[in-house]
């Protein structure tokens, strides 16, 4: 997996070269956020899906970077004072702290827009595949996807919510980009409809497991969720029930992988990794 992370990091760097133009700080800021200690789970999922479907990953690298840019934009905007107001991200000052609030907003806007440019220019993919990729990410990152999750998260802050609302938030804030990443892999590898459906179901379960494990890890420290009195799985269900649900979703994801007629060892590995620190 390390080789693939290196490929992603190298390409991310190449896609945003440092600039000497009047607005060079935009590109410096984008690099500041992108070249950090992110785990690169979503771009890895694109590459690992393509590889499991026995296709060359070369043409998947740019679409994988596009997803990482969209994820990074969402983190930059999430950290803003008007949203979660977080001073640190990926082990260093968040972008609005290191630069300025206005530049953080514009850098997020740039990464989101640039992701679509990268998808429309992706080499070796047909026009039909590029349209499919753009349709897919527009849906999962859009108003009924990632942004819906963020609206729910902010508007329900400090309020008591039911489990249905928590699931809505988790699904949209987290599972959507996991689904988009894995669907990207299926589109690039031209997977058949029934196979694609199985991969998407795997992604949904993995994404939900990831968010539940994230809530468990966040519960240990003075997290932003606690400061903002946000409902989390742990605050609503307690630690034991949250752990059970997290491991149930992870098991379902792993069972789906096992049912696929491909070598999914690497996807299995990454699915198991997310619970390594949870006992
Ligand atoms: C601003 C539209 C918009 C959305 C923001 C990303 C997000 C939605 C909120 C951040 C807070 C949060 C806990 C979101 C759930 C998704 C999640 C766990 C993000 C962190 O993903 P990792 O752990 O991060 O993969 P790295 O830094 O490793 O890439």
Image (tube, rainbow, N blue to C red):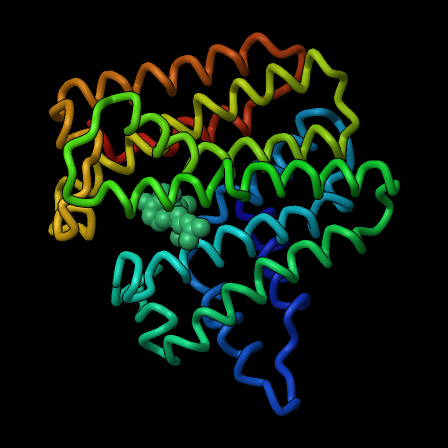
Q: Position of residue 206 (x, y in %)?
A: 44, 26
* Quadrant assignment, res 189: top right
**Mark count:** 0
Q: Is residue 39 left or right of residue 68?
A: left
Q: Position of residue 53 (x, y in %)?
A: 71, 25
The quarter in which the N terminus is drawn is top right
Q: Residue at x 39, y 14 (%)?
A: 251
Q: Position of residue 160 (x, y in %)?
A: 15, 33
* Quadrant assignment, res 38: bottom left
Is residue 202 shown above or below 125?
above
* Quadrant assignment, res 172: top left
Q: Nearer the viewer, residue 192 or 50?
A: 192
Q: Position of residue 93 (x, y in %)?
A: 30, 71
Is residue 251 shown above or below 80?
above
Q: Residue at x 64, y 84 (%)?
A: 19
In the rendered image, the residue lying farthest to the top is: 259
Is residue 258 shown above or below 219?
above
Q: Residue at x 50, y 36 (%)?
A: 144
The quarter in which the C terminus is drawn is top left
Q: Is residue 60 left or right of residue 198?
A: right
Q: Is residue 40 left or right of residue 228?
A: right
Q: Residue at x 19, y 36 (%)?
A: 231
């Amino acid at each position: 997996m390390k080789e693939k992370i290196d490929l992603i990091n190298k390409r991310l760097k190449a896609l945003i070269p440092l600039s000497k133009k009047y607005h060079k700080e935009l590109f410096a800021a984008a690099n500041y956020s992108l070249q950090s200690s992110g785990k690169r789970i979503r771009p890895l999922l694109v590459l690992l899906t393509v590889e499991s479907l026995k296709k060359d990953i070369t043409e998947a690298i740019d679409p994988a970077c596009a997803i990482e840019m969209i994820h990074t934009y969402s983190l930059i905007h999430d950290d803003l004072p008007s949203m979660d107001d977080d001073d640190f991200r990926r082990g260093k000052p968040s972008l609005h702290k290191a630069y300025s609030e206005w530049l953080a907003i514009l850098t997020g806007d740039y990464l989101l827009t640039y992701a679509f440019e990268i998808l429309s220019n992706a080499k070796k993919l047909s026009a039909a595949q590029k349209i499919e990729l753009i349709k897919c990410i527009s849906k999962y990152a859009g108003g009924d996807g990632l942004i819906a999750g963020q609206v729910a998260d902010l508007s329900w802050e400090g309020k008591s919510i039911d489990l249905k609302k928590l699931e809505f938030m988790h699904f949209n804030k987290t599972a959507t980009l996991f689904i988009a990443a894995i669907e990207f892999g299926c589109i690039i590898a031209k997977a058949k409809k029934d196979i694609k459906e199985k991969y998407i179901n795997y992604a949904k379960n993995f994404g939900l497991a990831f968010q539940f494990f994230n809530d468990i890890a966040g519960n240990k420290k003075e997290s932003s969720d606690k400061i903002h009195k946000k409902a989390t799985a742990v605050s609503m269900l307690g630690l034991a029930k949250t752990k059970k649900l997290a491991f149930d979703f992870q098991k379902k994801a792993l069972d789906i992988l096992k049912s696929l007629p491909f070598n999914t060892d690497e996807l299995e590995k990454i699915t198991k990794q997310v619970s390594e620190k949870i006992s």
